[in-house]
Image (cartoon, rainbow, N blue to C red):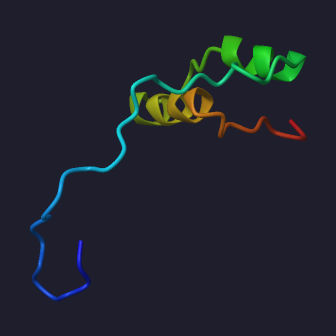
Amino acid sequence: MSSQKGNVARSRPQRHQNTVSFKNDKFDKSVQAKKINAKLHDGVCQQHKEGLERCVTYSKYKPLSKP
């Protein structure tokens, strides 16, 4: 999109499209990654549960260093 004010119409289609979904355990075979993938997020509301699952899916989830 252009940076012109009010120009919201795109003149060309999207250049790149993913054909294969992201796999968070493709290269990372560590024990910590396996624990993160196996973890169940119970005891939180639905909105936060979806956010945590999205972080795990895209390898953005970092466990707490101290409980």
| Residue 21, horizontal then vertical, whole percent | 46, 24
Residue drawn where x is 53% and y is 27% of the image: 22
| Residue 48, horizontal then vertical, whole percent | 48, 36
Residue 4 vertical position relative to residue 49 in the rendered view, above or below: below
Residue 13 vertical position relative to residue 64 in the rendered view, above or below: below
Furthest toward the bottom, the residue is 5
Residue drawn where x is 51% and y is 32% of the image: 54
Q: Nearer the viewer, residue 53 or 66?
A: 53
| Residue 27, horizontal then vertical, whole percent | 76, 23
Q: Nearer the viewer, residue 45 or 37?
A: 37
* Quadrant of the rendering where the C terminus is positioned: top right
Residue 55 vertical position relative to residue 9 in the rendered view, above or below: above
Residue 57 vertical position relative to residue 7 in the rendered view, above or below: above
Left or right relative to 15: residue 41:
right
* Quadrant of the rendering where the N terminus is positioned: bottom left
Q: Nearer the viewer, residue 2 or 15?
A: 15
Left or right relative to 63: residue 55:
left
Residue drawn where x is 32% and y is 50% of the image: 15
Left or right relative to 67: residue 42:
left
| Residue 26, horizontal then vertical, whole percent | 69, 19
Residue 56, image quadrant: top right
